[in-house]
Amino acid sequence: MDVLPAFLSHLGNERRMAARTVEAYGSDLAMFFGFLRLHLGTEPSLKALSGLKARDIRAYLAARRRDGLSDASIARLLSSIKALYRWMSRAHGLENAEIGYLQGPRRAPRLPRPVSIEAAKDILHEAETEPDAEPWIAARDLAVLSLLYGGGLRISEALGLTGADLPAPERLRVSGKGAKVRLVPLIAPVREAINAYGKLCPYALTKSGALFRGAKGGPLSPRIIQGRMQMLRGLLGLPETATPHALRHAFATHLLANGADLRAIQTLLGHASLSTTQVYTGVDSSRLRAVHAAAHPRA
């Protein structure tokens, strides 16, 4: 039997996969079968496929990598091959234990995308001076964004503050992920922004009630701040990656760039593991490489 057409027929007729999905599987596996014809010196039959070793698959993936395929593409090819073998097991009772142990390339951790120092300053300035917003709402948005960039808070942590946090203390008690509590030092501009909002807010900010309020007096929704950032990045010509969370990333990255200790940054961010914080060393290294490439006379 022609193995590949039979498998693709199974995907389209029995699994009801979309035509484009079936076509993608077909494209991936056609290249694999072409490699096997040369590698084995014969047509890849069910018997030949069931007898393949892990090293045979690795040889194919290595060949494709030499062709310039990315890690993501290599992972997709391996996924297609494993899907073929699952079908062989279910439809024909042919097992190949070695295939199941194959692992695709590990994806490098995605680096955070912080905004630059200049962009962060511009965001805070525009939030404060928004002409179309009521003064108390402009002050509110400035206070929230200042907590993200000046204190490294998550948006959920900032919006979880209560009226008991007024006036803003020098060391803010923050309840983070997993209900873990940490103390975050607040620099003067952040405290001033919070206190200015507290004076302008038209609603009673009780000790047990939400500190940041929506236009109708209820707890402020994260979507409002996300929408505000969307408007600000459009105004300033910033990329879509300039989100509220990017301000928290910027807090960590800019501290690291100015010599802050990684352990201290871990504590400030409320990361349970130092490995999470270490991602920021990659961000700073990327920035340094870019500066080096642009400035070095031999680059």
Image (spheres, rainbow, N blue to C red):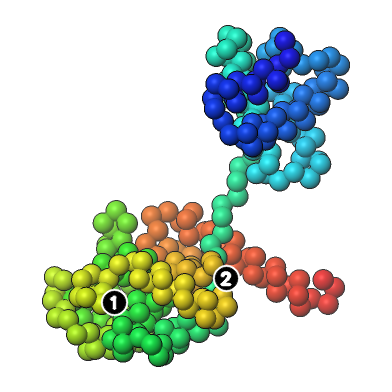
203 with respect to 284 (left or right): left
Residue 143's spot in the image, x, y percent? 34, 81
In the figure, residue 11 lies in which quadrant?
top right
Image quadrant in which the C terminus is located: bottom right
For the residue pair 8 and 220, the one nearer the viewer reads as 8
Q: Residue at x 76, y 78 (%)?
A: 295
- Depth check, mark 2 against mark 1: the one in front is 2
- Residue receiving disc 2: 239
For the residue pair 172 and 138, the one nearer the viewer reads as 138
- Distance between the Cα atoms at labels 2 and 1? 33 Å
Binning the other alpha carbons within 10 Å of mark 2 as few (below 14), some (14 to 19) or many (20 upward) gives few
Binning the other alpha carbons within 10 Å of mark 1 as few (below 14), some (14 to 19) or many (20 upward) gives few
In the figure, residue 2 lies in which quadrant?
top right
Q: Residue at x 28, y 58 (%)?
A: 180
Secondary-structure class at tag 1: strand
- Residue receiving disc 1: 171
Residue 242's spot in the image, x, y percent? 51, 70
For the residue pair 136 and 299, the one nearer the viewer reads as 136
Is residue 102 visible to the viewer in this orientation of the structure?
A: yes
Amino acid tagged 2: Pro
Res 264 label: none
109 with respect to 185 (left or right): right
Q: Earlier in the sequence, mark 2 or mark 1?
A: 1
Amino acid tagged 1: Arg
Residue 262 versus residue 232 in the image, above or below: above
Q: Residue at x 70, y 74 (%)?
A: 291
Residue 131 versus residue 145 in the image, above or below: below
In the figure, residue 228 lies in which quadrant?
bottom left
Is residue 152 visible to the viewer in this orientation of the structure?
A: no
